[in-house]
Image: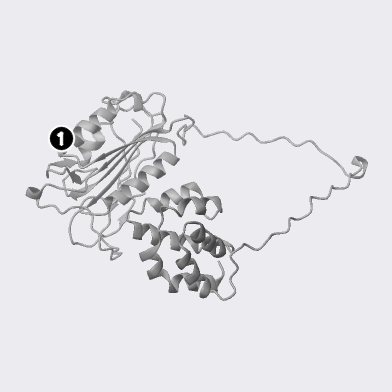
Amino acid sequence: MEPEYRDILRRNRVRLVQSLQLTDLWDPLLERGIFSNDMIEEIQREGTRRDQARKLLIELESRGSQAFPLFLLCLKESGQDKLADTLQSGSGACALEPIPVTPSPGPKPLPKADPAEYPTRDVRRKKETLDKDKDYPMSSDLSGLCLIINNMNFHECTGLSNRTGSDVDRDKLANRMRSFHFDVMVKDNLTGQAIHDHLEELAAQDHSLRDCCLVVILSHGCETRHIQFPGGVYGTDGIRIPVERIVSYFNGSKCPSLRGKPKIFFIQACGGDQKDKGCSVTTETPPLSPTSTSLQSDATPVFSGEDDNDEVDAVSTCMCALACLCAL
């Protein structure tokens, strides 16, 4: 978008956010090609009408040189003439119709070359194969099952604050995992026992036709003593679940259909006013072995560091993000 048009949008942003009627605007925006279906759905997920309007204006600035005049047309078509006139009056001689584009002539045929003038040689395409000792096969139509547990609202008796905004992380994670061809299950506000039940249910599934399994837990966290997984998460009733217990549901003896396949765990566990110390990954962990026959976990955790303080306001008394790869 031209700088002058971007400046007009920014000078009128307060009025636009207050007055934009979005319901009748979506179809013109789509028909004019300003936004795609996916982009409109992403804007609509912002929550309130004002939040959606604010997001729309931000995205509009990146939609090319014709976005501004096309947006004015969309406002006219949706019955918002006053807003269109306000923007147009601030844009000088801004045309409501997009500038016509003259199509370029078709491609010119390449001259035919005489094979006798140019030497030729046979070329064979190199076959690329996976190193079976280092790579997990990821060829299934469905990558695997993904369970997302999002605890936002906690019982008053626990003394734990509600985790406002965690639903945004939940939705973005769910959409991202679906784009990776995971079958996503989302569970909100689970007690400690309910967390155990859903983990046990997931582990009991038949994963034979899937390549891996993914568990995401967003909740409050706490410190627990364990050599490999020193942390825990809370249910909405204040019941503490050690990370070690979470991982153990998916070991080779309890979940044989995932044996030899990666199990990935992401745990975001915020809990307090302390500073996040950042994280570091040890380089001394043994290499993963996809062909391992061990029934015990070889999960590799990411621990909180103690030296580098990145001054982030959020805190993780457990692991801010724990990633485990278990080849059981």
Left or right: 110 with respect to 139?
Answer: right
Looking at the rendered image, the quarter that the C terminus falls into is top left
Give the image location of residue 52, x and y in percent. 38, 57
Q: Nearer the viewer, residue 212 or 62?
A: 62
Could you tell me the amino acid type at mark 1?
Answer: Gln
Task: Please give the name of the residue rendered at 60% of the width and 68% of the height, measured from the top-left corner.
Answer: 95
Residue 209, relative to residue 327: is it above or below?
above
Q: Which quarter of the picture shows residue 234? A: top left
Residue for badge 1: 193
- Taking 106 as reference, is 38 left or right? left
Mark 1 neighbour class, 10 Å CA radius: few under 14, some 14 to 19, many 20 or more: some
Tell me which residue sits at (27%, 57%) in the image: 305
Measuring from the top left, give residue 77's x and y in whole percent: 51, 57
Q: Quadrant of residue 291?
A: top left
Among all residues in the image, which is located at the extreme left?
Answer: 157
Can the viewer see residue 284 in this picture?
Answer: no
Q: Quadrant of the N terminus?
A: bottom right
x and y percentages locating residue 236 in the rendered image: 15, 44
Q: Residue at x 26, y 36 (%)?
A: 247
Horizontal side of residue 75 vs 164, given as left or right: right
Q: Residue at x 27, y 51 (%)?
A: 166
Q: Quick one: 252 or 94, which is closer to the camera?
A: 94
Q: In the rendered image of this protein, does residue 260 appear above or below residue 218?
A: above
Q: Nearer the viewer, residue 28 or 161?
A: 28
In the rendered image, residue 50, in percent from the top left (x then y), is placed at 35, 60
Secondary structure state at the residue bearing disc 1: helix
- Which of 135 and 78 lies nearest the eye of the viewer? 78
